Amino acid sequence: MTHTRRHDLGLLALRLGAGGVLFAHGTQKLFGWFGGHGLDGTAGAMEQMGFRPAKQSALAAGLGEAGGGTLLALGLATPAAGAAAAGAMAGAVSVHAPAGFFVTSGGYEYPAFLGYVAAALGLAGPGRYSVDHATGHRLNRPWLVLAAFTGSAAAACSVVRRRAREAAEREAAEDVDE
């Protein structure tokens, strides 16, 4: 087996694995599949975590994970897929960051890893065994890498900052009530 074929098979395996995990997590949020809580349950949890508006935040997180994961697995619009999934994981990292790094203590290790893998795939491209390759890379262009990651980073920063403001305001209100 040639080096190129091994490389393309490795990208396929990574896309299928990471994309499948992201898809499963996203569909938990959106539809309640795989033991999830569905959109309304996820919106309630997002509200508790300080994401406002909660239902739209739950929908965005679910679509970023399920949609980004599906597109990554297919190798379709790979830069946008990787950026969307990485952006969704940035929100999850912000929730888990106070608990430290390791997942065993509730930390951000797992969502950070998923986001990192999604971003790496978006940057590296899908390889030969992909829909992008079959369509002549129409949705896998260098300008799309820059646009997708810039947009995703801006959106993630906005969401995380807004959540931090909401948390600070809630804490201040609780201090006044005491």
Image: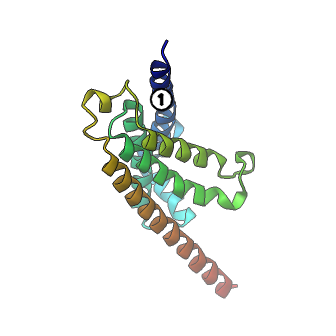
User: The residue under label 1 is which amino acid type?
Assistant: Leu
Of residues 123 and 26, which is closer to you in this image?
123
Residue pointed to by mark 1: 11
Say what secondary structure mark 1 lies in: helix
Of residues 166 and 122, which is closer to you in this image?
122
Residue ID at (37%, 31%): 74
Tally of numbered tags:
1
Of residues 52 and 131, which is closer to you in this image?
131
Residue ID at (57%, 80%): 169
The answer to whether residue 157 shows anywhere in this view is: yes
Relative side of 134 to 26, left or right: left
Residue ID at (45%, 22%): 4
> Can you say whether 92 is above or below 74 in the image?
below
- Local packing at callout 1 (Cα closer than 10 Å; few below 14, some 14-19, many 20+) is many
Relative side of 62 to 133, left or right: right
- Tell me the quarter of the image containing the C terminus: bottom right
The answer to whether residue 32 shows anywhere in this view is: no
Relative image position of residue 94 (x, y in whole percent):
59, 60
Residue that protrudes farthest toward the right in the picture: 105
Relative image position of residue 98 (x, y in whole percent):
69, 62
Relative image position of residue 71 (x, y in whole percent):
37, 37
Relative side of 2 to 129, left or right: right
Relative image position of residue 42 (x, y in whole percent):
49, 52
